[in-house]
Image: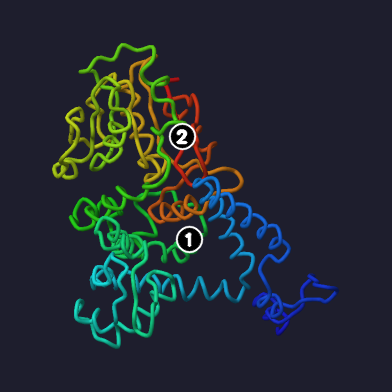
């Protein structure tokens, strides 16, 4: 019986077949040794090389440097430290940031790099001094703000950005309408005998929030959730290459050349385009391409859209219904299909296929394409967020299967760099 219990507990105190300098290691030894010691020398070289390139030659080397540094931290930290990071620091720093946002603490600290004492921050926020002292210490320990002295702090780039609601809205959005569903995933998957979630009506989200509705039902009924969601969608791609940027998707060659698009013809329909962030970016980067742009989303969403370029028309439309614009040069969807399981995606795609003009119309799907190896953490994290609502980020094989079933063929998948959504270009099969 004791033998079985030890096995069930993962042989927590026993030896395993791993050695270091000829010594057999047990779990207790491994827990306090670097996680991937053999990789540390090469990672140090990567950090040094990328760091030199970043500081001396190429600002674009920041991302390779960041990834090398992150990999080095993962290799250097011990399993015990990794456990504490996941179980202690990630959840508590989130709680501290969201509390600071609600208090207006980051606004009180300011954006001018002037150190401010806890006493000054108490005056600005009205928070209890003891609470604020604990809060600022943890925020500083996690790198959110900078400690400049005893009970004295100043801003970082991160805290400055969080003074603006369109950025800080991400935190209450996640807590109010995502986090409980994510935390319910283990129990939900156990309940479903570890089947891959594919239903939009039986989800971990509904379990976590004890709700009969899915996420998008709450968005439609809760103006604060809709605002936070649209703010988050409007900023999460900032600083990353976009599909319409030079060197990504050849807009002129693929959409304009060989056609006779007039100024009143429809060039691009953004299906489910929220407040028009993508179309505004497209028009700014391609001011001289002919044709009109159409923003479509639910009437309650587009009713508050304003300050768009005159060439952008706004139309209330539910993409689960018939597409009213026929024969556009291109129909575009950004992060729409990843929100729905395959059966719902088939309905969305069927409405677009019916509206497309053979030999002319294109469908542009701006989504993550998960690679078979080397998947990026942003995409895999988002995959789990989608998992809680019954959907997924898809692999290239899964995209081919989904789109071909709808009567489309993928002409090319355009990809810029890891962590950035690809552009899947499709035509009628």
Tell me if residue 320 can be seen.
no
Q: Quadrant of the N terminus?
A: bottom right
Q: Position of residue 209 (x, y in %)?
A: 31, 64
From the image, tell me which residue sits under label 1.
Answer: 189
Q: Position of residue 230 (x, y in %)?
A: 26, 50
The tag earlier along the polypeptide, 1 or 2, is: 1
Whole-percent x, y for residue 329 in the image: 32, 20
Front-most of residues 386 and 381: 381
Residue 72 or residue 353, whichever sits in front: 72
Residue 275 horizontal side relative to residue 394, left or right: left
Image position of 137 with respect to 71: above or below: below
Which of the two marks, 1 or 2, is nearer to us in this view? 2
Q: Secondary structure at mark 2?
A: helix
Residue at left 26%, top 63%?
A: 163
Q: CA distance from mark 1 to mark 2?
A: 24 Å
Report the side of 220 relative to 348 (left or right): left
Instruction: Please give left or right for residue 289 compared with residue 60 in the image.
Output: left
Contact between marks 1 and 2 (CB within 8 A): the answer is no
* Residue at image location 67% in from the left, 81% down from the top: 5
Q: Secondary structure at mark 1?
A: helix
Which disc, if any, is residue 402?
2
Residue 222: x and y, percent? 19, 56
Point out which mark residue 317 bears.
none
């Amino acid at each position: 019986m004791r033998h079985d219990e030890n096995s069930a507990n993962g042989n927590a105190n026993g030896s395993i077949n791993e050695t270091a300098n000829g010594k057999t290691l047990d779990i207790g030894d491994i827990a306090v040794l670097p996680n991937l010691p053999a990789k540390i020398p090469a990672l140090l070289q990567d950090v040094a090389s990328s760091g030199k390139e970043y500081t001396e030659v190429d600002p674009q080397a920041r991302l390779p440097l960041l990834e090398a540094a992150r990999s080095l931290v993962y290799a250097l930290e011990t399993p015990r430290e990794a456990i504490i990071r996941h179980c202690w620091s990630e959840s508590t720093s989130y709680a501290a940031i969201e509390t600071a946002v609600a208090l207006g603490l980051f606004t009180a600290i300011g954006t001018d790099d002037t150190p401010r004492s806890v006493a000054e921050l108490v005056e600005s926020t009205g928070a209890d001094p003891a609470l604020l002292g604990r809060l600022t210490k943890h925020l500083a320990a996690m790198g959110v703000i900078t400690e400049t002295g005893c009970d004295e702090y100043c801003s970082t780039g991160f805290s400055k950005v969080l003074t603006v609601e369109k950025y800080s809205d991400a935190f209450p959005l996640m807590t109010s309408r995502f986090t409980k569903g994510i935390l319910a995933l283990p129990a939900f998957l156990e309940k479903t005998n570890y089947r891959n979630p594919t239903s939009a009506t039986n989800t971990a989200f509904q379990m976590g929030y004890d709700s009969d509705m899915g996420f998008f039902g709450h968005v439609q009924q809760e103006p604060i959730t809709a605002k936070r969601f649209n703010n988050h969608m409007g900023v999460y791609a900032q600083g990353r290459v976009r599909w319409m940027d030079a060197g990504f998707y050849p807009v002129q060659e693929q959409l304009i050349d060989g056609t006779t698009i007039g100024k009143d013809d429809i060039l691009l329909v953004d299906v489910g385009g929220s407040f028009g962030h993508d179309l505004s970016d497209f028009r700014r980067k391609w001011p001289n391409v002919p044709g009109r742009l159409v923003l479509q989303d639910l009437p309650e969403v587009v009713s508050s859209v304003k300050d768009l370029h005159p060439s952008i028309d706004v139309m209330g439309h539910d993409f689960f219904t018939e597409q009213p614009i026929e024969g556009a040069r291109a129909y575009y969807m950004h992060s729409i299909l990843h929100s729905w399981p395959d059966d719902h995606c088939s309905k969305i795609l069927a409405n677009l296929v019916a509206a497309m003009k053979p030999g002319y119309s294109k469908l542009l799907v701006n989504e993550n394409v998960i690679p078979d190896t080397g998947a990026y953490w942003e995409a895999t994290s988002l995959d789990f967020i989608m998992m809680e609502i019954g959907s997924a980020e898809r692999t290239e094989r899964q995209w081919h299967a989904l789109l071909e079933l709808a009567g489309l063929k993928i002409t090319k998948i355009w990809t810029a760099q890891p962590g950035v959504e690809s552009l899947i270009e499709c035509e009628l099969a």
